[in-house]
Amino acid sequence: MNILVTNDDGVESSGVRTLAKHLKKLGNVWVVAPERPQNAMGRAITLHKPLRLKQLGRQVFSVNGTPSDCVIVATGRVLCDRPIHLLVSGINKGLNLGDDVTNSGTVAAALEGAIRGIPSMAVSLEGFKRFRFTSAARVAVEVATLVLKDGLPTDTLLNVNVPDVSAEAMTGIQVTSLSRRQYRNSVVENVDPRGSAYYWIAGEQVTWNRRKNSDVDAIAAKKVSLTPLHFDMTQYAAVKKLTAWESSLSKRPWSS
């Protein structure tokens, strides 16, 4: 089994090192990760400058780009002649819940793998200054074992979030849905020593549930949240209604 490991916290992160160490129980691990932190990059791809691939150790590489860049370079160059049986992105320092998955470089790397037909999962860990990477890595190995054994539905990746408790204190693993997460007062203004205004994107999190069994509720209950994500973003419930617009819109004088 060839297992590709990446992240958005950078190749030197304790999270990616702990994850890679534990996944070696399951197969041949290759690490291709950003040379420096690339948090909140989403699925950004570098097209305006050349990418540099540097080998740091046996089957450990850095890329001067985004998490998505790392997956593209790994599949197109580092492992181009080898099958990749699993991609695991993480362990991220901080949770990736609700709407934040669209911003997350950790989740985006797993999405990049899933688009390429690789069974993929993202692993994120609750914490602030201290992170229980070993506990999260053990969870990742258990989930990865099942993914390798049973596979995943087509066009689906897993978003795994681990609560900040010891393995013994976890109350279980729950399959969840994405909650909603927005930010109140999301732009903070300050003034620099020269009197010019500058801004930080920050703010207070406001979270609520879309439906039962949300990822936020699972974490609050000290459970691991396991959310299947589907990258077909079509809102099928709206297709029927909007189809009624076709006739009217088609009569518009587009060429005039």
Image (cartoon, grey):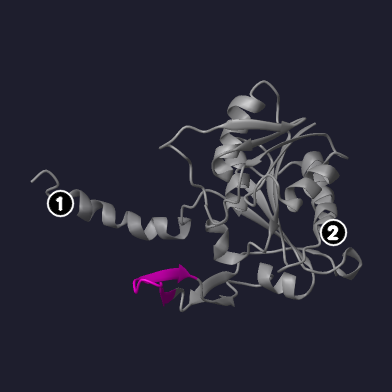
User: Is 30 on the left-hand or right-hand side of 182?
Assistant: right
Q: Which mark is residue 252?
A: 1
Q: Where does residue 192 sit, x and y in percent of width and height?
A: 40, 72
- Say which label, 2 or 1, has the lower sequence index: 2
> In the displayed structure, would residue 186 be above or below residue 67?
below
Measuring 83% from the left and 69% from the top, which residue is drawn there?
165
Q: Residue furthest left?
A: 256
Quarter of the rendering containing residue 160: bottom right
Q: Judging from the image, what secondary structure is the residue with disc 2 in? A: helix
User: Is 96 on the left-hand or right-hand side of 199?
Assistant: right
Q: Quadrant of the N terminus?
A: top right
Residue at the spot of label 2: 135
Q: Where does residue 251 sit, x and y in percent of width and height?
A: 16, 50
Q: Residue furthest top?
A: 81
Measuring 77% from the left and 44% from the top, which residue is drawn there?
147
Q: Where does residue 152 sit, x and y in percent of width and height?
A: 70, 44
Measuring 53% from the left and 57% from the top, which residue is drawn there?
102
Q: Amino acid at mark 1?
A: Arg
Q: CA distance from mark 2 to mark 1?
A: 59 Å
Q: Nearer the viewer, residue 183 or 93?
A: 93
Q: Which residues are magenta?
A: 188-201
Q: Nearer the viewer, residue 158 or 186?
A: 186
Q: Where does residue 178 sit, x and y in percent of width and height?
A: 61, 65
